[in-house]
Amino acid sequence: QVFKLEDYRPSDFSIPQTGLTFRLSPDATRVTAVLTIERRDGAAASASLVLDGDGLVLKRIAIDGRELAPADYLATPDQLTILKPPARFELLLETEIAPASNEALMGLYRSSNVYCTQCEAEGFRRITYFLDRPDILSIYTVRIEARMDEAPLLLSNGNPVESGPLTDGWHYARWHDPFPKPSYLFALVAGNLGQVADSFVTMSGRKVELGIYVEPGKEGLAGYAMDALKRSMQWDEQAFGREYDLDVFNIVAVSDFNMGAMENKGLNIFNDKYVLADRETATDADFANIEAIVAHEYFHNWTGNRITCRDWFQLCLKEGLTVFRDHEFSADQRSRAVKRIAEVRTLRAHQFPEDQGPLAHPVRPRRYREINNFYTATVYEKGSEVVRMIRTILGPEAFRAGMDLYFERHDGEAATIEDFLKVFEDVSGRDLSQFALWYHQAGTPNLTVSSTHNPAAREFTLEIEQSVPPTPSESRKRLMHIPLAFGLVGAGGEPVAYGGVEGAAVEDGVIHIRKRRHMVRFSGVDERPAVSLNRGFSAPITLSVEQKADDQFFLAGHDSDAFARWQAFNTLLTDALIAAFRQILGGAKPAFSARLTGLAGKIAGDETLEPAYCALALSLPGEADIARDIGRTIDPDAIFAAREALALAIARANQDAFANIYGRLADDGRFSPDAASAGRRALRNTLLDYLSLLPGGASLAAWHFEAATNMTDRAAALTVLAHRHDGSPEAVKALAGFEARYGADPLVMDKWFQIQASVPGPKTVERVRALTGHAAFSMANPNRVRSLVGTFSSANQTGFHRADGEGYRFFAQTVLEVEKRNPQVAARLATALRSWRSLEPGRQAKAREALLAIAGAENLSADLRDIVERTLA
Ligand code: ARG
Ligand code: ZN
């Protein structure tokens, strides 16, 4: 079944009140729903009520206290139709569900004996029959009954109302959420959990009780998440004027979770990987993720919950906007420049390939078969970039005014992208209709730019041409409005003043590209400047710039915009890598300029730069990034060889300097997860990676591993040993030591799986296959599957794309095995082959065979079928 945006129609019925009673038991939980249902004004009196279900067993049905006769309704596991319902009535439904055998982890399920729920997008219908769509807003009252010994803790959305004992060792709790919400935000948690408690006083002086619930014994690992939560609450007041609105805010960490986390009203449920952390078990990247995700889910309280989505086509309305908000939060808490570079790296690594392959779709899709497959980098990350561009176009004040208007105008509603754009048009008086294409049109726009300087006329001219490549089902593209931030940089690094501009609107350092071609002419420019383009990554585009290497080197050393400076160096590295790739394919030995390798040394030693910036600059473009930039007939082995050669050349050219800086950054044994400390560790570990390529590298890494006083350094050293010195006594010893030390900690073992799954080369597929039999591995746990199989297929170019296709065969088998339990996780895994058409012909054929093997399997889930069919189309 295909769902289409243009088919949207409001429901004939509304459900103003929802009462739910759960009598919890692992194999037979009784759910009693009492729904107040009203026929909407204007709906036909003859309209029957059709409720969504998914695998449900109906045990009882009554209207206004009267049991229904079989002729009054039609119940299947997936639908309940009530024929000729009255205009206003109370519907009672009893269903029975089995949380313990729910391995899809949607609806009500058990994770390590804790009852928990995941309802977004369409999981609520696995609990009871309902109008399970986001524009049905209802006020929920929930009663939970459970055995006291099995589930001492009973949580749901909203505020606690009452609780107490029942007979036979049972007890109950009642929760009431005063804010109308869609069913996807419903949540319940019941079990035996440890609590970390704190409180927050909001800007209007209301006290909110905060709780983070974790597996008993792990309370000590929730401190950072709690701190991040309080900082998030405060930041949303300051940055957006948004105050929290309930008496309590709870977060629960569970170990089996399909995604990162979920913003259920007042009761966020998290993958424990994004809650639990201390120096011993979590890396700096883990700390940063926890901070960002805690903030993200908290920010959803306004962008998602108070204002929700009319339908699932509008998913980016809450996700893109909330990602933008969490990015801004992290930028304010950490280093804005470093954060921006990291964001762009992520966008390019995940969204660009999606946008350039068979799974491309607009930020607001127009059709879907399975909505769970649209929780994508395009909806989230590109969706965030689109919001950022609105701010760039309007400026920060008008943007804030627009957001204020959005909250005021749409609070309590299920809104659309059109509603969102309208508030910014209203506050600014601007016409955003061309800009709106960013939501409607898929594909990554490209700008081709060349420049000329005419000293006699004192004119500097940019010729800019835009194009948007075709994407599936959109062969013809319309011209976009692209805000291109730029700077003209003089020989001393200073901004070049110009007299006037013609050819395009230029405001506050931004060229507004709206046509196919623009000739932007700056007058009064005496000397030819270097042009810095797409500063701050003002638009999510690709650039083809005719730029002299001299200018590129100059910008890499002097651009005042940190992002653009990083970009200039990254472009130099990428160009060198692509040239080396071609040399290798042509049978030659790649060579690199001393100017390039020398600049790497200068950056590492430049004390005016933040260490975190240097670390990002020195980490070479990934193999997948290089492949994406090459575009076609990819041979991952040649890319790998090119990258290794450049790394070695940089290491050799800067041996002494790197060793010095590495020494200067030595760990003093104190630990703080703050951004500056993390940045120093990042630079030191990046240098270790280079130094490990030189003689004595394995013993240096082994020493680094043994001496580490935190997980960041330990995992970095283990990665170097396993990836650069696989099979060496040092690597073998470190891997075994790590396993012995952390074997009982699943989240840390995930790192051990990841590091091994990403060992480059043809032998890794066998190793990964063997590791699926490891005691710490489980096909039923999404984190384990993603760490081992997900890492292998999406982050190991030479291993996964082994020339004989063995990587793909293992992958196809595993995807199908995971799918039997958990279609959503399997479908996500399967996207690893989305760029198969850019491979060289031999690998392409083998990748296709693997996709066909998946497509041909019996009883394929809608989730997986959707992904493989679109990938093959
Ligand atoms: N809304 C959640 C978040 O971004 C993600 C939930 C995804 N769920 C799903 N079934 N795809 O914070
Ligand atoms: Zn979200």
Image (tube, grey):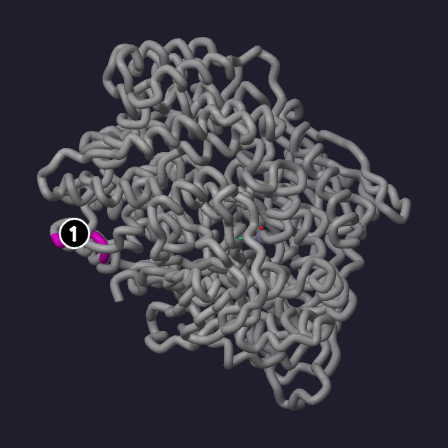
Residue 563 in the image: state x and y as whole percent. 51, 45
Residue 839 is a magenta residue: yes
Please name whichever residue, 691 or 701, is drawn nearer the observer in this view of the structure: 691
User: The residue tagged with tag 1: helix, strand or loop?
Assistant: loop
Q: Which quadrant holds the C terminus?
A: bottom left
Pick the front one: 475 or 808: 475
Task: Tell whether 550 sits left or right of 282.
Answer: left
Rendering coords of residue 742 (x, y %): 45, 18
As drawn, which residue projects farthest toward the right?
Answer: 205
Picture layout, residue 25 above or below residue 604? below
Q: Does 628 appear above or below 637?
A: below
Image coords of residue 632 (percent x, y): 22, 55
Q: Look at the magenta stretch and give its main secondary structure.
A: helix
**Residue at x-position 78% and y-position 48%:** 238
Of the residues shown, which amino acid type is indicated by label 1?
Glu
- The 10 Å Cα crowd at callout 1, few under 14, some 14 to 19, many 20 or more, is some
Q: Is residue 122 visible in this depiction of the protein?
A: no
Looking at the rendering, which quadrant does residue 170 occupy? top right
Q: Quadrant of the N terminus?
A: bottom left
Q: Which residue is mark 1?
A: 840
Q: Is residue 455 visible?
A: yes
Name the residue: 36% across, 48% down.
Answer: 829
- Near-viewer residue (376 or 724): 724
Q: Residue at x 39, y 58 (%)?
A: 543
Q: In the displayed structure, does residue 436 sit left or right of residue 307? A: left
Identify the residue at horizontal 66%, vertical 36% (top origin): 151
Residue 469 screen position, x and y as percent: 34, 68
For the image shown, how many numbered marks are present on the structure?
A: 1
> Which stretch is magenta?
837-841
